[in-house]
C-alpha cells in the first residue's frame, strides 16, 4: 500500500472521528482498549482493502507501543551463560587460571646487540642513489636560444647509479635518527653500528637515508624477537572474578528491528 496524501487524510479523519487520537496526535487509550477487545470502529470503505496495513501504520507512526525506549534498552544486563558455566569442572578450572599477572621483559643488552649486528651484516642492502638524464646542453648558449628552449637538446633517456660517496651540505644524525626509530639508547645503537663490518657500514655514504631506514627496520625486528623470547609473566595475589563473563553485556533488544514499517512511510 502506497500512502498518498488522500489516504493519509482519510486515516487521520478516522482517528479523529472515533476519538482515537488526542490533541498531541498520540493514540488514546480508547484505541488500545478497542483494539484489544476487537471492537475498533470500521474503516472507511476506501481503506477496507488495506485494513491490516492501515492499523500497522497507525501503530508505527502514532503510537509509541512499538518503540524501543532508551531508558529500557541501554546499559548492561547479565549475559545468560550456558549450562557449562554452572558445572563444577568449569569452576575448578577457573579457580586455577583466574590469577592476575604483571608482565615484563628481561634480556641482556649484549644479546640484542649481537643479534642486530648479525642481522645488519646479513640483510642490510642499501640501494645506491639513481639519477636520470635525457638531454645535453648546447655548445653555445645565447639569450635567444634560452628563450626559445634551444639551449638543451633531447637525447636518449639513461638511468645511472651513483656508487661514490655522497658529498652534500646535508648533515645526517645517524645515531640520533636510528635511536629515535628503534627506541633504544644512543650508546646501544653505537655499539651495534661499531660491531658491523666496515664494508656494510660503508653503504651509509652511498645513500644515508636508505641506510638509516633499512638499519632501523632490521634493528626493530630483532628487538621485537628478543622481547617475545624474554617476555615474563609474574602472578600476583589478585584474581579475576567470575563475573567478568556476565558484565558489560548489551541490553538492547533487536527482536522488533524487522517490523515492516518502511513500505508504509
Image (cartoon, rainbow, N blue to C red):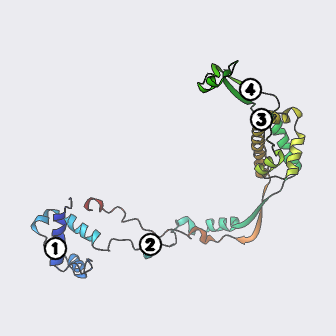
Q: Earlier in the sequence, mark 4 or mark 1?
A: 1
Residue at the spot of label 2 = 73
In front: label 1 or label 3: 3
- Say whether residue 45 is left or right of residue 35: left
Q: Earlier in the sequence, mark 4 or mark 3?
A: 4
Q: Is residue 226 above or below residue 1?
A: above
Residue at the spot of label 1 = 13
Q: Earlier in the sequence, mark 2 or mark 3?
A: 2
Q: CA distance from mark 2 to mark 4?
A: 67 Å
Q: CA distance from mark 1 to mark 2?
A: 34 Å
Q: Secondary structure at mark 1?
A: helix
Residue at the spot of label 3 = 207
Coordinates of residue 252 in the picture (x, y in percent): 45, 68
- Determine which of the numbered discs, if any, sits on residue 140 in the image: none
Dot 1 surroundings within 10 Å: few (below 14), some, or many (20 or more)? some
Q: Earlier in the sequence, mark 2 or mark 4?
A: 2
Coordinates of residue 99 in the picture (x, y in percent): 71, 67
Q: CA distance from mark 2 to mark 3?
A: 61 Å
> What is the quadrant of the N terminus in the image?
bottom left
In front: label 1 or label 2: 1
In front: label 2 or label 4: 4
Coordinates of residue 171 in the picture (x, y in percent): 81, 43
Coordinates of residue 234 in the picture (x, y in percent): 78, 63
Amino acid at each position: 500500500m502506497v500512502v498518498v496524501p488522500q489516504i493519509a487524510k482519510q486515516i487521520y479523519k478516522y482517528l479523529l472521528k472515533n476519538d482515537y487520537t488526542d490533541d498531541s496526535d498520540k493514540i488514546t487509550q480508547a484505541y488500545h482498549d478497542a483494539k484489544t477487545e476487537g471492537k475498533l470502529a470500521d474503516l472507511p470503505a476506501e481503506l477496507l482493502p488495506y485494513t491490516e496495513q492501515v492499523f500497522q501504520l497507525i501503530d508505527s507512526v502514532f503510537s509509541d507501543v512499538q518503540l524501543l525506549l532508551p531508558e529500557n534498552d541501554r546499559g548492561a544486563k547479565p549475559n545468560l551463560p550456558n549450562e557449562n558455566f554452572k558445572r563444577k569442572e568449569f569452576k575448578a578450572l577457573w579457580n586455577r587460571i583466574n590469577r592476575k599477572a604483571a608482565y615484563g621483559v628481561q634480556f641482556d643488552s649484549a644479546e640484542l646487540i649481537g643479534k642486530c649486528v648479525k642481522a645488519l651484516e646479513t640483510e642490510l642492502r642499501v640501494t645506491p642513489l639513481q639519477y636520470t638524464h635525457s638531454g645535453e646542453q648546447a655548445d653555445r648558449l645565447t639569450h635567444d636560444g634560452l628563450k626559445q628552449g634551444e639551449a638543451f637538446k633531447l637525447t636518449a633517456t639513461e638511468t645511472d647509479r651513483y656508487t661514490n660517496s655522497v658529498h652534500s651540505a646535508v648533515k645526517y644524525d645517524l645515531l640520533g635518527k636510528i635511536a629515535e626509530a628503534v627506541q633504544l639508547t644512543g650508546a646501544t645503537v653505537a655499539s651495534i653500528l661499531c660491531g658491523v663490518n666496515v664494508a656494510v657500514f660503508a653503504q651509509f655514504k652511498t645513500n644515508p637515508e636508505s641506510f638509516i631506514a633499512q638499519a632501523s627496520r632490521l634493528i626493530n625486528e630483532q628487538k621485537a624477537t628478543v622481547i617475545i623470547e624474554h617476555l615474563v609473566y609474574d602472578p600476583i595475589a589478585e584474581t579475576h572474578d567470575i563475573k567478568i563473563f556476565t558484565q558489560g553485556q548489551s541490553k538492547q533488544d533487536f527482536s522488533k528491528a524487522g517490523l515492516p514499517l518502511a513500505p508504509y512511510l
